[in-house]
């Protein structure tokens, strides 16, 4: 196996995809695993509080997802199934339009694209958790302490019975401008997450068939390096 730095445009895009996927799963985790907060009269605060209350006792999540990515000259749709386990184990299995596998084992993340015979890996440390949605994975934060919340008006809801919430991070120098949650106004289930990058690009993840507190073996989150693949280190040197 060869180990080399990512330098091509295609590799840079995949590196950005890894960062976006980590942020999204982390935000999902923050919503599902953070401690409950008190409800308020404000509908936005009520939706956020209800979301956290809804999933206060959740330790595992599995769901089907559809991911869309919009950038200049690009409109891409992918879909598959995700598994997540507290405090920070993740596995995303993409099935359409091509097989692709993303793992986070608590120490590193791995993106394996069989068609390219490549594995992209990146460290996954305590430092990565600071001032990002990832800190919620360890139960260290609440959404309203790390984000300013307001009603979303740019991205439209997919249903009349959902609330659209924009979360603007309070921490400076992040590579995204804001996040959007689509929350069921009756059950407080999480329906969709959107990430607006500082470049203007938009990633969206819509969730269906979500189940919580199902038994998931830790082996599902352990990546086995295939033979003969190119290994690409994405960490800054």
Image (tube, rainbow, N blue to C red):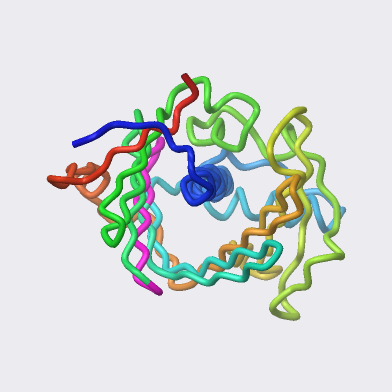
Q: Main secondary structure of the magenta part?
A: strand
Horizontal relation, residue 78 to residue 105: left or right: right
Q: Nearer the viewer, residue 123 or 163?
A: 123
Q: Nearer the viewer, residue 2 or 80?
A: 2
Q: Looking at the picture, does residue 30 appear above or below residue 126?
A: below
Horizontal relation, residue 228 to residue 66: left or right: left
Instruction: State whether residue 32 appears in this view.
Output: no
> Residue lying farthest bottom?
160
Q: Looking at the picture, does residue 29 appear above or below residue 192?
A: above
Residue occupying the point 40% across, 37% down: 88
Horizontal relation, residue 55 to residue 183: left or right: left
Q: Nearer the viewer, residue 23 or 57?
A: 23
Residue occupying the point 52% across, 44% down: 12
Horizontal relation, residue 217 to residue 108: left or right: left
Query: Is residue 134 in the magenta section?
Result: no
Q: Which residues are magenta?
A: 84-97
């Amino acid at each position: 196996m060869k180990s080399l730095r990512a330098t091509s445009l295609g590799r840079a895009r995949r590196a950005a995809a890894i960062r976006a996927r980590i942020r999204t799963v982390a935000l999902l985790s923050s919503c599902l695993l953070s401690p409950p907060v008190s409800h308020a009269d404000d509908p936005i605060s009520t939706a956020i509080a209800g979301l956290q209350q809804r999933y206060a006792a959740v330790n595992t999540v599995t769901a089907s997802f559809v991911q869309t990515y919009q950038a200049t000259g690009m409109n891409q749709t992918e879909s598959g199934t995700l598994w997540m386990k507290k405090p920070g184990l993740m596995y995303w299995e993409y099935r359409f339009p091509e097989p692709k596998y993303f793992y986070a084992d608590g120490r590193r993340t791995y993106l394996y694209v069989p068609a390219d015979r490549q594995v992209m890996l990146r460290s996954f440390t305590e430092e990565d958790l600071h001032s990002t949605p990832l800190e919620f994975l360890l139960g260290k934060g609440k959404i309203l302490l790390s984000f300013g919340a307001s009603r979303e008006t740019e991205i439209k809801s997919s249903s009349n019975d959902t609330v659209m919430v924009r979360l603007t991070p309070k921490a400076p120098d992040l590579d995204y401008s804001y996040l959007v949650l689509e929350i069921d106004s009756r059950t407080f289930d999480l329906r969709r997450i959107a990430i607006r990058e500082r470049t203007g690009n938009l990633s969206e993840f819509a969730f269906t068939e979500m189940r919580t507190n199902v038994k998931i073996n830790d082996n599902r989150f352990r990546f086995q390096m295939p033979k003969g693949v190119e290994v690409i280190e994405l960490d800054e040197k």
